[in-house]
Amino acid sequence: MNRRFTLGAVAALALLAGASCSDDETGPEPEVNFSANLTGDAERPTPVTTTATGTSTVVIDDEDETFTVTINVGGTGVVDVTMAHIHVGDANTAGPIAVNLLPNPPAAGTFTGALVPGLTFNTIVAASGETFTSLAAKMRAGNTYINVHNATNTAGIIRGQLVAQ
């Protein structure tokens, strides 16, 4: 009889434990953060010698299906910035552009500070073939990077692989 009572008590406790876990959601994380340190040494296929540096953050909001990107440049700054993008590719690959982050580049000259101060978007450039879901998956897999281009270094002056935080 004692054994029956023990088994019954264990079963009852298991049912109660399962019923009390009503907050178990299997949906996506509401926000995922990525960052990159931007350097000339990280440029591919040819590293660039420069004192310009930068940092970038990307926040993926799965619930709203948006990306928010910030890029800050420093060091001696970047001279004559022309473009900034998210590219698809690993750390050793010069890959295709997924998103243009700088539709209106700053005036010619040295730029230091918030190049992209917090661009939020949910529409990916149609020509890239990327969707929110595909680009977010590539970021999570470590296959995206931020690249800043200038007039002298049209392939890119500073670059950094996006890494989950």
Image (spheres, grey):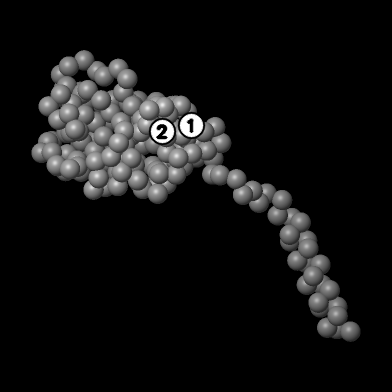
User: Which residue, as the protein is rendered here, is positioned at the far top?
Assistant: 107
Amino acid at dot 1: Thr
Q: Secondary structure at mark 2?
A: loop
Q: Secondary structure at mark 1?
A: strand
Whether residue 75 is visible, yes or no, is: no
**Which label belongs to residue 129?**
2
**Residue marked by disc 1:** 66
Cα distance in 3D space between marks 1 and 2: 17 Å
Looking at the rendered image, the disc whose residue lies closer to the viewer, 1 or 2, is 2
**Side (left or right) of 66 relative to 49:** right
x%, y% of residue 57? 36, 36
Residue 155 seen by the camera: yes
Q: Residue at x 41, y 33 (%)?
A: 129
Are there few (<14), some (14-19), or many (20+) residues within 10 Å of tag 1? some
Location of residue 124 in the rendering, given as x and y in whole percent from the top left corner: 42, 29
Q: Label for residue 26?
A: none
Say whether residue 157 is left or right of residue 120: left
Mark 2: which amino acid? Answer: Gly
Q: Residue furthest right?
A: 1
